[in-house]
Amino acid sequence: MKKFYLALLGLLLVFNASADFKSINGLTGNFENAGSWENGRMPSVDGVVTEKMIIQGIITRSGDLNPVTVEVNGTFIVNGNYENHQWDGLKITKDSKVVIFGNLNASQSVTVEKGGILIVHGNLISTNAGLHIKGDLIVKGDFSTSSGTQVNNSGNLVVGGDFSHLGGGLNVKSDDVYILNPDATIVSPGWGVINDGSYGTLEDFLQDENGTDLGNLVDETGLLNPVVVWLGTNNSDWSTASNWKNNKVPDYNTSVKVSVSTNAPVISTDAVCKEMTIEAGAEVIVNPGASLDIATTFTNNGLVVLKSTPDAVASLNVPESNMDSGRGRVELSDVKADQWYRLGVPVSDGTGIMLDASESTNWVYRSTKSWKRITTDSEPVAPMEGIMVLYEADHVIDFEGTLNTGEITRTIDYGKGFYLFSNPYTSAMKWDISNFQTTGVSVSDNVSSTIYYRVYAGSQVGDYMITYNGFTGQSTLVSGGNFPGGYTEANVGEIAPMQSVWVKVNDSQSATITVNNKARRKQNTMPLKSTSSSSERSVISLMQTNEFISDVTVIAFDDIFSDGLDRADSEKMFNGSKNVPEVFTRVDGNALSINGMAALNGMAMSIPVSVRNGIMSEVTFSWELTEFSDNYHVFLEDKGTGSWINMREVVDYTYTPEKLGDNHDRFVLHLEKMQEVATSVATVDSENVEDIEVIGNNNNVVVRISAGLLGSNDATIEVVDLNGRVIENVKTRSTETQISLPAGAAVYVVKVVSANTQKVAKVVGR
């Protein structure tokens, strides 16, 4: 009977072993994917695991983990906290690695065999258990063990935060333990190397481990930059070295801790650090126009105060991985009376009280189908919801809330029309819908690719519209124009913190806009008020300027665009002021400020250009062709005067409106492909021949040859079109010869040969 019992026990043991969760050897995969596990048998995706796990290959867990026994024979990455409280705990075998990005809480044993690595980015807390370290244990945060914990370390123990051991066994050697933070709080029993101060410091580590595998590993973990603590000894200036412990102003390699102090740090320029912790009760103040840029880790248990004006916006730039920015106070001062501001709130728990909506003299509207006025302080204001405000007197908007970060989605279900969309973050964001995985902005198919800024352009113009297409990267800002200050070709696609812009929903279906931290930008150069291009793209920018301001329309050609309406097109939003000289093109009756068209392939194309003028004032047409194909002639036809302007030779053209309002028939843009002309002429231009003059005159070309050059010999005049066809070939002994050109607008090459002299010139038929 005894042997039979043992046999059954053996069978049970074999059965239980085969029931372990075992990842596929050599595979790189996700914990939550059944394909990462042998036979598809996987642990619970909620992270609570009640059977032994064996990790082989490289497995990543997204979120917290609370397992029983875990044996790691490969690499195991946990993007969350790790609870180690059951069965046999955690075992890391030779040449294996575990990385925990949260805390490790252990009441069961943790074993790291020789050659194994355990990295804890948070804190390690061990109670009534054993830590058996023959490999490397690196703790970026605090290391804390209870009196019931036995620490056996014959490998390397490296701690970046505080060190606390309350009296359990501590079997370590002085050259095996490093406490890198010079400001660390250290608690130990009254004996051993920790009590004696015989452990290694940061200086010891840099000297002993420079260039070693351990040194490189600790450096990659970010532990070689000690925490710099704010003291505020002299004043509140962040940039003053004496306000920091060790007299060091933070840089991109610095970890910063801000505790409660008499002088809270105030940032008045652009401040940077690698990591930041704001402790409970402490605050950091960012002044108007300044920014705080945190590279890798941000923990805010206190308060960030962002002080802005419409012309100088404060910004907080958090790491892409940051999903909790804590609490913030937003202060917008110098808000002028009787002026509309288009805003949003950078907090997730916004209400009307933030905008003083209940005061009867304040006008606060939300962007719904009918522009609903908010009159109660309890009215919710959602992230990315646009708000318009107008105050009877100069005003300061001041409110506090939970700062937005991470992925946010807004649903617009008010039907077809234009609505305000606001930047939900505390830093600028880029409107780029070309690839959500890399740019962090996604819109449903019925949302236009375009955003529109209404910005103040002076008392003669008032609100002025700027257009930016987030699919093509084209905008109606070009160099040389008379535009509102603060907006440039470089920043026009970015949206300032608290700024709202217009977007269009194209049908009555529910629409969505989703953004995440990838959309955030570190710099913010825009005032508040208010995809990479294809290598084959050709762009023409047309600008109208009068005595007040400029307006621009853009025509872009690319093989990924179509001649019909698509995401490459931006609808024209007209300005309210009659003083703006509007210019645009049209497709199927739709006015466009940005017109994306299919790539140029034909011999010629004509594009009508519409204008809208509200005052009888001279208007100057100018253009930008630096991004346009060199293979086409470009002409602007003014049908009102009969003029044809060669836009490659002339920089602008001034006209007077024939009528006020829209004029769709006066101007036409002509594109004609350049052809190799079938003549023996080596060069197409020889304008410096003084004895021969070629003049285009409507549908005629006049050739004048000096009598001295002509003599008694015949001269030859040849007229060739751009396809190489000879239109006329005339022999003459006259000093002035007129040749009729075919009807219709076209470009011709005229070659004149007299004696041993020749001249070639271009003329344009009307």
Image (cartoon, helix red, strand yellow):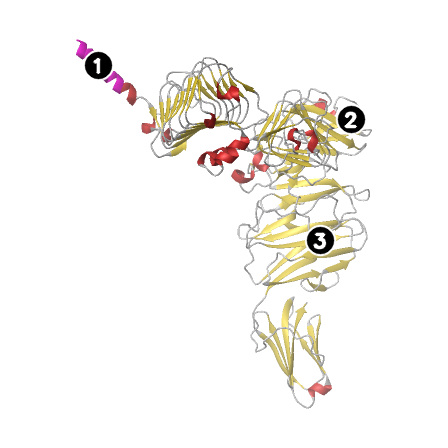
Q: Which residues are magenta?
A: 1-14
Q: CA distance from mark 1 to mark 2?
A: 82 Å
Crowding near the residue tagged with mark 1, few <14, some 14–19, many ≥20 C-alpha atoms within 10 Å: few
Of the 4 image quadrants, the one containing the C terminus is bottom right
What residue does disc 2 label?
362
Residue extending farthest to the top is: 1
Q: Are marks 2 and 3 in contact (CB under 8 Å)?
A: no
> Is tag 1's residue or tag 3's residue first in the polypeptide sequence?
1
Q: Nearer the viewer, mark 1 or mark 3?
A: 1
What residue does disc 1 label?
8
Picture residue at 79% right of the left edge, 23% below the top: 360
Q: Secondary structure at mark 1?
A: helix
Q: Are marks 1 and 2 in contact (CB under 8 Å)?
A: no
Prevailing secondary structure class for the magenta stretch in the rendered image: helix
What residue does disc 3 label?
543
Q: CA distance from mark 1 to mark 3?
A: 90 Å
